[in-house]
Image (spheres, rainbow, N blue to C red):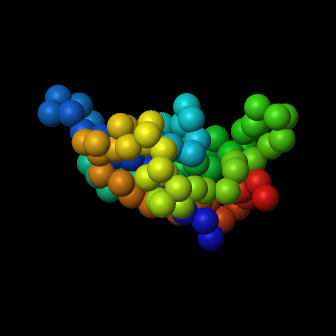
Amino acid sequence: MPHYIALIHKDSDSCYGVSFPDIPGVFTAGDTVDEAMQQAREVLQFAAEDWINPDGSTGFKAPSTIDELRNNPEFLEDAKEAVVAFVEYPARAHAAE
């Protein structure tokens, strides 16, 4: 089962925010890290239901590896003050091949 890399951010006056470098515009949050991670799994499943890629295909692209993302300057900037986590992609949704 694929795992997408997530970035977890926390400001002192906010909840834990989770974003996915491979899936722009998909993000969630929770009051605790555990809640944020549970929300992250759920938001992946929800977003996959109606996901349309710029080329018109549906489904998420295969997840990037951490090594691929480390070669991306935008990821490096976004990850500076974040915790990097792996979020399991829900079993009933399918990534694009």
In this image, 34 relative to 92: left or right? Answer: left
Q: Give the answer, above or below, for where 16 lies relative to 14.
A: below
Name the residue located 36 percent from the left edge and 54 percent from the top edge.
84
Residue at x-position 62% and y-position 50%: 45
Side of 20 where 51 appears, left or right: right
**Position of residue 76 measured from the top left corner of the image (x, y, whole percent):** 38, 43
Disc tally is: 0
- Residue reaching furthest to the bottom: 1
- Give the image location of residue 62, x and y in percent: 67, 56
In terms of depth relative to the viewer, which is nearer, 4 or 16? 4
Q: Is residue 91 visible?
A: yes
On the image, the x and y values in percent for residue 78 come to 37, 38
The answer to whether residue 27 is above or below residue 84 is above
Q: Residue at x 56, y 35 (%)?
A: 24
Please identify the quarter of the rendering in which residue 31 is found.
top left
Q: Is residue 72 left or right of residue 7?
A: right
- State the residue at coordinates (75%, 47%): 59
Which quadrant of the figure contains the N terminus?
bottom right
Q: Quadrant of residue 11?
A: top left
Residue at the far left in the pictured view: 12
- Residue 30 visible here: no
Which image quarter is the C terminus in? Answer: bottom right
Q: Position of residue 50 (x, y in %)?
A: 74, 38
